[in-house]
C-alpha cells in the first residue's frame, strides 16, 4: 500500500496512506463527512481507541489534522455526540491509574470508581445511618473517577486524593465538581480534590471564575505520553504530601503558626508562581 505523504492546507503534510499516523487523519475525515461537521478530539480518540491505536499519537495527529483543515478554537459537538464519545475520558483515567500503580506502594493504593461519603447523619435513635468505613454509592456517597487511599495499621482505608476526569470543561462542570469537593471535604477535611481535562490545551478562564473548593486542575490536551506520566506522578506525590500535612495539623499531631495558600501555574513546562 502507498505510503506517499500528501501536502495539505496551512503548510502541513498529511501522513502517508496506510501508516498509523495517516489512519488517524482518515478517522477524522470519515467522522467529519459522516456528521457533516468537524470531528471533535473526543470522537477521534474514542474511535482510535476502538481500533487499538496509540492514544497519545492519535491526540497529536488530531491536532495536526485540525490545523491543516483550518479549524481553529474548540470544536462544538452536540450533546448526543459527546455522550457517544465519553470513552475518551477513560483514556486519561487509564493513564492516571497506570501512573499511580507505578509510583505508589503500600500503604498507598489507587481505586477506580470508589464511593466517598458526602455526609454522615444519625437517625432518631442517634445511630449512624451509614458505615463510614464502607461507603456505598446512593447512600450518602458519591462515586469518584479515581481515588488514592492510604491503608492504616488497622486496615482502615482513608481517602487522600481524588481525580475527576472530563474531556472538556463547562461552567456547569466547574460548579458541580466544586460543590462535590466541598461536600466530601466536610467528611474528610484532609482530602485533596481536583480535575483533569483531557481535550483542552489550557485551563479555561471559567475554572478560575467559578471554582471554590477544587484544589487543582490540569489541561492535558497537548501532552504526549511521557508528559502525561510525568504530570500524574508529580501531581499525586505533591497532593498526597499535602493531604498528610493537613491531617496532622487538623487532628492536632502538628502545630503551625502561619497558614497561606500559594498560587502555582505551569505553562509550557515551566512554573509561574
Image: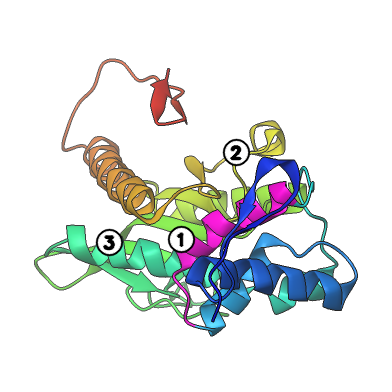
Task: Give left or right: position of 105 versus 42.
Answer: left
Mark 3 or mark 2: name the one nearer the start of the chain. 3
Question: Image point 17% across, 32% down: which residue?
Answer: 254
- Residue 202: assigned label: 2
Q: Nearer the viewer, residue 145 or 63?
A: 63
Residue with the mark numbered 3: 100
Alpha carbon of mark 3 to alpha carbon of mark 2: how far?
23 Å
Nearer the camera: disc 3 or disc 2: 2
Q: Nearer the viewer, residue 88 or 115?
A: 88
Nearer the camera: disc 1 or disc 3: 1
Dot 1: few (<14), some (14–19), or many (≥20) neighbours within 10 Å?
some
Q: What element carries label 2?
A: loop
Alpha carbon of mark 1 to alpha carbon of mark 2: how far?
17 Å
Question: Image point 81% across, 61% down: which residue?
Answer: 38
Nearer the camera: disc 1 or disc 2: 1
Report the magenta stretch's main SS: helix
Mark 1 or mark 2: name the one nearer the start of the chain. 1
- Quick one: quadrant of the C terminus? top left
* Residue 185 vertical position relative to residue 126 in the rendered view, above or below: above
Q: How many marks?
A: 3
Give x and y (percent) for residue 80: 82, 75
Magenta span covers which residues?
Answer: 52-68
Colour scheme in use? rainbow
Residue found at the far right of this picture: 36
Task: Give left or right: position of 245 versus 55.
Answer: left
Q: Is mark 1 on a helix, strand or loop?
A: helix
Q: What element carries label 3?
A: helix
Residue with the mark numbered 1: 56
Question: Image point 64% across, 32% down: which residue?
Answer: 208
- Quick one: quadrant of the N terminus? bottom right
Amino acid at each position: 500500500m502507498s505510503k506517499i505523504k500528501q501536502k495539505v492546507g496551512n503548510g502541513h503534510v498529511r501522513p502517508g496512506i496506510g501508516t498509523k499516523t495517516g489512519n488517524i487523519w482518515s478517522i477524522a475525515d470519515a467522522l467529519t463527512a459522516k456528521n457533516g461537521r468537524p470531528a471533535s478530539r473526543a470522537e477521534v480518540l474514542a474511535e482510535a481507541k476502538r481500533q487499538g491505536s496509540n492514544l497519545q499519537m492519535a491526540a497529536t495527529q488530531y491536532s495536526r489534522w485540525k490545523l491543516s483543515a483550518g479549524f481553529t478554537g474548540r470544536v462544538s459537538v452536540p450533546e448526543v455526540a459527546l455522550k457517544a464519545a465519553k470513552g475518551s475520558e477513560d483514556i486519561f483515567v487509564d493513564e492516571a491509574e497506570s501512573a499511580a500503580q507505578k509510583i505508589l506502594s503500600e500503604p498507598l493504593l489507587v481505586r477506580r470508581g470508589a464511593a466517598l461519603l458526602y455526609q454522615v447523619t444519625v437517625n432518631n435513635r442517634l445511630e449512624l445511618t451509614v458505615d463510614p468505613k464502607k461507603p456505598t454509592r446512593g447512600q450518602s456517597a458519591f462515586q469518584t473517577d479515581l481515588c488514592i487511599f492510604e491503608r492504616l495499621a488497622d486496615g482502615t482505608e482513608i481517602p487522600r486524593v481524588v481525580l475527576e476526569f472530563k474531556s472538556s470543561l463547562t461552567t456547569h462542570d466547574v460548579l458541580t465538581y466544586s460543590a462535590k469537593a466541598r461536600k466530601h471535604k466536610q467528611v474528610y477535611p484532609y482530602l485533596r480534590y481536583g480535575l483533569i481535562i483531557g481535550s483542552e490545551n489550557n485551563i479555561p478562564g471559567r475554572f478560575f471564575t467559578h471554582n471554590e473548593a477544587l484544589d487543582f486542575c490540569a489541561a492535558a490536551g497537548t501532552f504526549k505520553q511521557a508528559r502525561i506520566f510525568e504530570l500524574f506522578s508529580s501531581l499525586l506525590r505533591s497532593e498526597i504530601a499535602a493531604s498528610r500535612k493537613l491531617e496532622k495539623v487538623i487532628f492536632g499531631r502538628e502545630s503551625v503558626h502561619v497558614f497561606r495558600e500559594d498560587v502555582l501555574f505551569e505553562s509550557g513546562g515551566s512554573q509561574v508562581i
